[in-house]
Amino acid sequence: MPSLTLKDIPQEVLVRLRELAGRERRSLTRQALVLIEGGLDREDGRPSTKRLAQARAWRELAGSWPSDLTFEEEVAEIYAARTGGRKVEL
């Protein structure tokens, strides 16, 4: 697979990219590619196929399960059930 080297990246941009990659649990390279792909999709004026598929999946799921909980309670239960993810040693 081809590679690309970026030079003269402003420190503030690199810090923001690292923070975002950390929040999204992606490598710095993967996060940069995600942002580049998203920018190219916007430049073309068309939504990405991934985004369209995700939106379609959300529409299909919306309202498809019965619950007596409020929205806030549902969200709290989802967050409580989440795991911390994989361990990473820095």
Image (tube, rainbow, N blue to C red):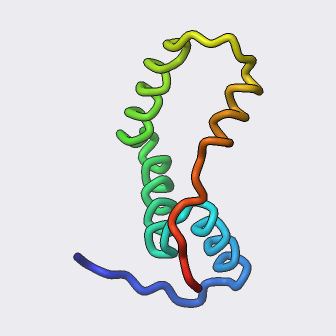
- Depth check, front residue: 72 or 83: 83
Number of numbered discs overlaid on the protein picture: 0
**In the image, farthest residue toward the left:** 1
Residue at 43% in and 18% down: 60
Q: Who is closer to the viewer here, 62 or 28?
A: 62
Q: Residue furthest bottom?
A: 8
Locate residue 66, reporting x and y percent: 57, 10
Q: Which quarter of the figure is the N terminus placed in?
A: bottom left
> Which residue is found at the position 61% from the left and 84% from the top?
9
Across and down, in percent, residue 6 comes to 48, 84
Q: Position of residue 74 (x, y in %)?
A: 68, 26
Which residue is drawn at the image coordinates 38% and 42% (left, top)?
A: 50
- Residue 62 horizontal side relative to residue 17, left or right: left
Instruction: Please identify the quarter of the rendering in which residue 57 is found.
Output: top left
* 86 up-or-down from 82: above or below: below
Vertical arrangement, residue 8 with respect to residue 71, above or below? below
Q: Quadrant of the C terminus?
A: bottom right
Residue 64 horizontal side relative to residue 81, left or right? left
Which residue is located at x 62 percent, y 71 percent? 17
